[in-house]
Image (cartoon, helix red, strand yellow):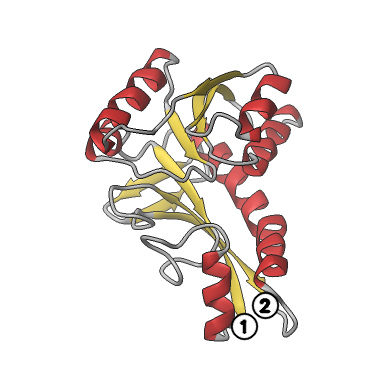
Amino acid sequence: MLKIGVLASGGGTNLQVIIDSIKKGYITNCSIAVVISNKKNAYALERARNNGIESVYIPKKDKTVEEYDRLLVERLEAYDVELVVLAGFICIMGERFTERFKNKVINVHPSLIPSFCGKGYYGIIPHEKALEYGVKVSGATVHFAELQADAGPIILQKAVEVKPDDTPEVLQQRVMREAEWKILPEAVNLIANGRVKIEGRKVYITDFGGI
């Protein structure tokens, strides 16, 4: 049974999708050990408590990246976390964290990487840039997280149509519903069942676990 830790800074809608997917049996061989936030009032923590999951607030204020890394690693290790899911966690990860959980941290990004990604591209910003550029297709990407933002190996992607009358907010909601909320639980399930294999920068989805 894979133990995962979810890191979230906001409402936790992606967290809720994972919780619901586990309850419905779509995600198997997996449990959420802890939810951690850098925001005291993040609703993600409330979602965790409502579902009987340990919730932890670790404030970031006045801490260096290295200090915060140490606190995160210590807390995740205390819960025997084997996979970390970044679900809207707006916080810079340092070298200690990314090395300790190398190829064990996944993130969902609201664009088709390598488009509209990298430092500063979070929240509504990727959708604003997509509309400014005039793309006809956007989407979401689940990837392994590395020290450089949105630069890790890609696990899954799903495209979403951009409509002529879209606003950034409307596009954001469609990308969440049609892409993020589908490929994030799928990626967690694949990893939990040993079906994800990494070779360099390439990720392979195998037919059988453990191969």
Along the viewing direction, whichever of 192 and 91 lies nearer the viewer: 91
Pick the quarter of the image with the C terminus.
Answer: top left
Question: Position of 97 compared to 184: left or right?
Answer: left
Relative to 81, is 188 above or below? below
Question: Position of 147 compared to 206: left or right?
Answer: left
Relative to 157, is 192 above or below? above
Residue 70 x %, y % = 28, 25
User: Which residue is the site of mark 1?
Assistant: 136
Quarter location, residue 45: top right
Q: How many marks?
A: 2
Q: Tell me the residue at 37%/26% (across/down).
A: 72
Q: Which numbered dot is residue 181?
A: none
Relative to 128, is 19 above or below? above
SS at badge 1? loop
Give the CA distance from mark 2 to mark 1: 5 Å
Residue 132 x %, y % = 55, 83
Question: Of the residues shown, which amino acid type is indicated by label 2?
Answer: Val
Residue 100 x %, y % = 27, 30
Along the viewing direction, whichever of 201 and 54 lies nearer the viewer: 54
Question: Of the residues shown, which amino acid type is indicated by label 1?
Answer: Lys
Q: Tell me the residue at 39%/52% (across/down).
A: 203
Q: Tell me the residue at 72%/85% (across/down).
A: 164
User: Which residue is the site of mark 2?
Assistant: 162
